[in-house]
Amino acid sequence: MTLPAIILVFIFSYIPMFGIVMAFKDNKSAAGYFSGNWVGFQNFEFFFRSNDAARITFNTIFLNALFIISVLVVSLSLALLLNELSKRWLVKTYQSVMFFPHFLSWVIIGFLTFAFLSVDNGFINKILIALGREPVYWYSNPNYWPFILTIVNLLKNAGYYCIIYYAGITGIDQDLYEAASIDGASRFRRMISITIPSIMPLISVMVLLQIGKIFYADFGLFYYVPRETGVLFPRTDVIDTYAFRALRVLGNTGMSAAIGLFQSFVGFVLVLVSNLITKKINSDNALF
């Protein structure tokens, strides 16, 4: 049963690792991806010495940290609320409604966001004008966008993680709830003392996996939702979009490969460190 997944991981995760050599070569794509002279760490220096390196690195870490925390809090809260519903058809209905946005592409979500935030015809600005307020120029002020991106990310991904946490909750032994109810524990006390501690290993694994990708930004979110508006780059430009522009404008595949290798290495180190800290606190919640 695991063979198809193993084959996919091997094809898309292990075979491309031969391309790591591109990060250390002066690559010219017209002559082949493995052509060019060895330049050592020059491709890395080109990125780290640029004026944008600190900004886009901070944006990537800060926004992804916001996403991890917000998705954890919202999706776990929704899963706990679903567990309190007694009617199964309501649970299935809410699950379907919350999970649906996960199947929408970022292109569609980008257009929907623009329909809400457009200056002239945006839904929010029309409401503000109807209330006698001035319209807000959302695509001209970068300070709004950490909150906008967090909300958009929540709408797309909170339902997905909610179902994962709810699946973990349904596996909890119901005898624990019955015993606590007999002892007089309220619903909230059962939630705090039984539900959350029981799924803490699942929460730890999910958070550790997301920490491993904290240096990877969701390219579709940061490319299509802000609509690649230059004035928003101070708050929306991340490592992935920066590397994409470098590859598209400069054709510098070596630097793009170096950035990708840097992201993978830092993510690997973060997973090891986070897992080690988790193991020190509670070994049962560690990933490995």
Image (cartoon, rainbow, N blue to C red):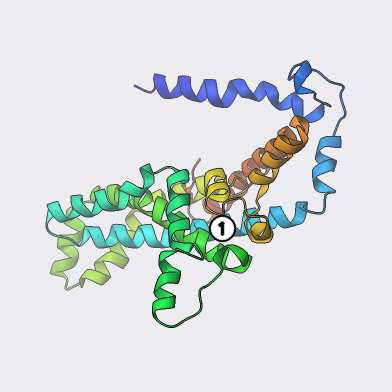
Farthest-out residue, bottom: 132
Secondary element type, mark 1 = helix
Q: Residue at x 45, y 51 (%)?
A: 111
| Image quadrant containing the N terminus | top left
At a point 26% along the width and 71% down the height, the residue shown is 188
Q: Residue at x 40, y 56 (%)?
A: 155
Where residue 41 appears, x then y in whole percent? 85, 35
Q: State the residue at coordinates (86%, 30%).
A: 40
- Tell me: residue 10, above or below residue 128: above
Left or right: 69 in relation to 93: right
How many labels were placed on the picture? 1
Left or right side of 220 for 80 = left
Q: Which residue is mark 1?
A: 65
Label 1 Cα crowd, 10 Å radius (few <14 / some 14-19 / many 20+) = some
Q: Nearer the viewer, residue 191 or 6?
A: 6
Quarter where residue 146 is shown: bottom right
* Residue extending furthest toward the front: 120
- Amino acid identity at mark 1: Ala
Is any atom of residue 169 visible in this view? no
Instruction: Examine the rendered structure and indicate whether residue 214 appears above or below residue 254.
Output: below
The x, y position of residue 236, in whole percent, is 62, 56
> Which x, y percent locates residue 100?
31, 47
Residue 20 in view (yes/no): yes
Dividing the picture into quadrants, the one containing residue 137 is bottom right
153 sits left or right of 59 in the view: left
Q: Nearer the viewer, residue 162 or 201?
A: 162
